[in-house]
Amino acid sequence: MGQITLQGVTKRFGEVEVIPPLDLTIEDGEFVVFVGPSGCGKSTLLRLIAGLEDVSAGDILIDGKNATDASPARRGLAMVFQSYALYPHMSVRKNIAFPLKMAGVSKPEQDRRIEAAAKALNLTSYLDRRPGQLSGGQRQRVAIGRAIVREPSAFLFDEPLSNLDAALRVGMRLEISELHNRLKTTMIYVTHDQVEAMTMADKIVVLQAGRIEQVGSPLDLYLRPKNVFVAGFIGSPRMNLFSGAAAAEYGAMTIGVRPEHIRISGQGGKWKGRVGVSEHLGSDSFFYVEDTGLAETITVRADGEVTLHHGDTVWLTPDEGKIHRFDTNGDRI
Ligand SMILES: Nc1ncnc2c1ncn2[C@@H]1O[C@H](COP(=O)(O)OP(=O)(O)O)[C@@H](O)[C@H]1O
Ligand SMILES: [Mg+2]
């Protein structure tokens, strides 16, 4: 079991309220991602759940029981950090065994759990090495192994892949998703990277300045962002946001159009402009179109084989059905 409920959870550091009263329920078995810009309170929220920080107000319930004052060890949760926090002088086996030893688990049971975790994480042949003899990805797997053997009711990950290079990050992202499919244990995963959030989550919680901006599935957030902040945060490259006359025409303060919802033509269209920077990724091409008469450069996504050059004149037409409208408060109309 691993249902976690936050009721009016608040955190102040001295005078500063980092997390205003916050309510959230994470269902048993869910993969929930907390995403938001650096400094928005993701780690603080995770540490409150783990019991590494005390709440200033509010309650934390784990499987319906009030755990607000329970010590971290009694909460039955396991945390994995960005810095792997492995003991350099201990073998992989001893690193993984460490929490079990602390908890007084018998030696045969320790061995059983270590073997199982090592197998799940492809670490079997590395058990006798020290962390210094492993790659970054392998070290992170050891840190995850140390969490798995505790058989927690939920895993808490704080930006676990930030120290890895791009290719390894993608690989580990898949491994963690597979691990979740297999274990079906609740996972709360913190990241500033919206691509990680979109690819891994059942449910995304978008945070800004300690507040929840929106909770929903990746597609909910992509298709129906509740406000300008979420619209601009989810999606890569980011949604084009226009104000002024362009928005007034649609009865809005701000309108948003995703780069993939704008068509390019050589002649005839809504906005005429000139190609500035082009990015060719092979699968897609991105064009940054300037001098359209709008204040903002327009980002357009096109098929990978579309080639345009700096200075080319193009016409752009948004898909009218995919335009997002926002009011003066930035809320979705
Ligand atoms: N121990 C602390 N004392 C004072 N301020 C803190 C402490 N820990 C975090 N903060 C502040 O709380 C805010 C949220 O921090 P954090 O949760 O680490 O953000 P994130 O993980 O989203 O980058 C930041 O403004 C940070 O400076
Ligand atoms: Mg953080």
Image: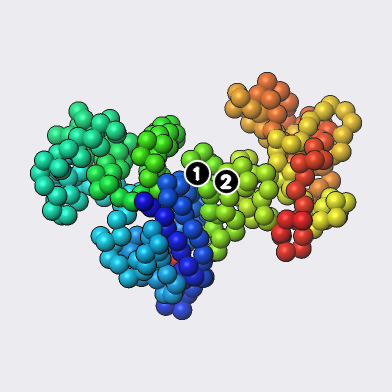
Counting from the top left corner in percent of width and height, residue 298 is at: 74, 41
Residue topped by disc 2: 217
Asked which colour scheme the image uses, the reply is rainbow
Counting from the top left corner in percent of width and height, residue 201 is at: 50, 44
Q: Residues within 10 Å of mark 1 (few under 14, many from 20)?
A: many
Q: Is residue 65 visible?
A: yes
Q: Residue at x 15, y 43 (%)?
A: 110
Rendered position, 39 above or below 173: below
Counting from the top left corner in percent of width and height, residue 194 is at: 54, 45
Residue type indicated by callout 1: Ala
Q: CA distance from mark 2 to mark 1?
A: 7 Å
* Left or right: residue 219 compared with residue 256: left
* Left or right: residue 18 compared with residue 262: left
Give residue 333's quadrant in the image: bottom right
Residue type indicated by callout 2: Ser
Asked whether the beta carbons under mark 2 and mark 1 sit within 8 Å of each other, the answer is yes
Front-lying residue, 115 or 310: 115
Q: Residue at x 14, y 34 (%)?
A: 128
Q: Residues within 10 Å of mark 2 (few under 14, many from 20)?
A: some
Q: Which mark is residue 201?
A: 1
- The local secondary structure at tag 2 comes to loop
